[in-house]
Image (cartoon, coloured by chain):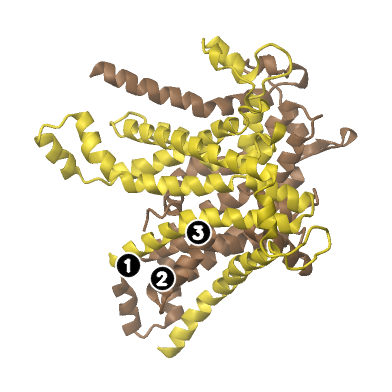
Amino acid sequence: MRLGRFFLYLVLIIFVLFYLMPVYVLVVTSLKSFKEISLRTMWIPPKEIGFSSFVRAWYGDKSKGLRGLSGNFMNSVYLTVPATLISSVLGSMNGYVLTKWKFKRANLVFALLLFGMFIPYQSILIPLVQVLQKTKLYGTIPGLILVHCVYGIPITTLIFRNYYSTIPSDVVEAAKIDGAGFVKIFAKVILPLSGPAFAVTAIWQFTSIWNDFLFGLVVTPNPSVQPITVALNNLAGSYFVEWNVQMAGALITALPTLIVYIFLGKLFMRGLLSGSLSGM
Amino acid sequence: MKTDRILSILFILPSLILVGIFIYGFIGWTGWVSMVNWRDVFPDFTFVGLRNYARLFQHFRFVISMKNTLVFTVLFLLFSISIGLLLAILLDRKVRFEGFFRTVYLFPMAVSFVVTGVVWRWILNPGTGGESVGLNWLLERMGLGFLKSGWYTDPNIGIKAVVIAAVWQMSGYVMALYLAGIRSIPNELYEAAQLDGANVFQLYRHIVLPLLRPITLSAIIILGHISLKIFDLVFAMTGSGIGFSCDVPALFMYDTTFRGNYFSQGAAIAMILLMCVAVLIVPYLTYSIRTEVRR
């Protein structure tokens, strides 16, 4: 039995090393100076710890044509925050109607909404670009906000619908008998109970919008408007850029969602599980 | 009562209109584009029927990318599901610091595929000289030198190198699914099995694993549709690779549409991808919602 426990922990720890290996490389490389960077010494800790690569990744270097990530980081903030809020509110409204004011064929409508969560976005990209160009939203942050709101509707509706179906209908019926109408029940009964669902949805949306690459790539060709994931890929794609700067850039890109994950991991997990429909 | 009904429709209407246009309308439009002759910056809406599809199946890059997707999907599912199941079972054996292990296994899910791609491209870089660098260096030091390889620069490996990064990112998610499943098995079942004198292996073989089958199905469907759609990771990590050895249909679609202006060809690829995903997802959705209604 003792031996069994030993092997159990051994396997668990080997996997910890596997999952943390890229983090190690990321951190170690980003703390090195350019002259210390080589593929041969990838696994060796830096002789001197320096933050110059972070400075270069953040501010860029005009003389070498290196674009810093600071502007793109802010672009990501400006697009992620409103898109997260709006899509969460839409999800809550839909979830309310789909659970407490079911209409005929509500389940069919829900299924059609949900399907949108799984489609390969390639199948909507061409018309999307055309429509955004016609409406002058192409290449702009409001354009990206719109896109993320729309394609966020399925998942936010799913999370809120699952959550609201755990609120007993009696609560709604009682409010109706007291003379409360549709809006009042939502504002006074449902919304005050919605805190946890908003938290789960907001974290989920924040993470997936921040991490989005495809929409940013296709909708914003102008580097000064691009979200950080696209900018990171450009930074990493130019062959003259030093690996330590690339790794620093990757770390900067990953940091906001990692912080959310470390501090609000439980809520993140709930979002993940509802994404698998297992909440149904 | 009547006003409430109208209000409730008004509440959900904006979302329905948006989804109706941006998902179903757009899919319809893409379907139409896939059947015309648009292969320039300027649209040409001459109807050509299924010609774009027919040509696609003879296009070497499309054939390679579909084969790559198949290889990628099989390996990605196999490794993610077995690692996920193993970790979930181990973590359920009353492990100390379970929270720590769970946090570490799941954290890659919070990271962008682009970050994953950039880091793994660096780790799996085999270098240009003869000496072992990157992961190869590490493997050599651990006495696993026989595992050294050219990774994504070797056309025989290509997409399989991307599988490593994808498994790194997604296996923790499968672990979380299974762990939630194991935890929802009622205790009485375990107790009953123990009363019958079942040992640990019999317990897993005859009680736990059969009860986890629906979760395996979910995992296959979720990972399967992710793998059909995979784009960001390949784009950031390898691109289409030497001789398109890392290419996938989503990448081909992007290249041919937005770099080559072959809009109709791109639309045809997108429709094929959509149909593959639909074959997987539609039965799953129908089943999930039906069972829920019955409950």
The answer to whether residue A122 is above or below residue B62 is below
Q: Compare residues B209 and B7 and report the one nearer the observer.
A: B209
Q: Which chain is yellow?
A: B
Marker count (numbered): 3
Residue type, numbered disc 2:
Asn
Residue B79 located left or right of residue A218: left
Where's residue A62, x and y in %? 87, 37
Give the residue number, with chain letter if any, for mark 2. A107
Cα distance in 3D space between marks 2 and 3: 15 Å
Marks 2 and 3 belong to one chain: yes
Q: Which chain is brown?
A: A
Where's residue B205, x and y in %? 24, 35
Q: Are marks 2 and 1 in contact (CB under 8 Å)?
A: yes
Residue A27, by quadrant, is top right
Kindly state the secondary structure of the residue where label 3 is placed: helix
- Which of pointers 1 and 3 indicates the residue nearer the eye? 1
Residue at the outermost right position: A63
Give the residue number, with chain letter if any, for mark 3. A155
- Which of pointers 2 and 3 indicates the residue nearer the eye? 2
Q: Compare residues B218 and A5 and report the one nearer the observer.
A: B218
Give the residue number, with chain letter if any, for mark 1. B293
Residue type, numbered disc 1:
Val
Q: Which chain's residue wears label 2?
A: A
Residue A124, by quadrant, is bottom right
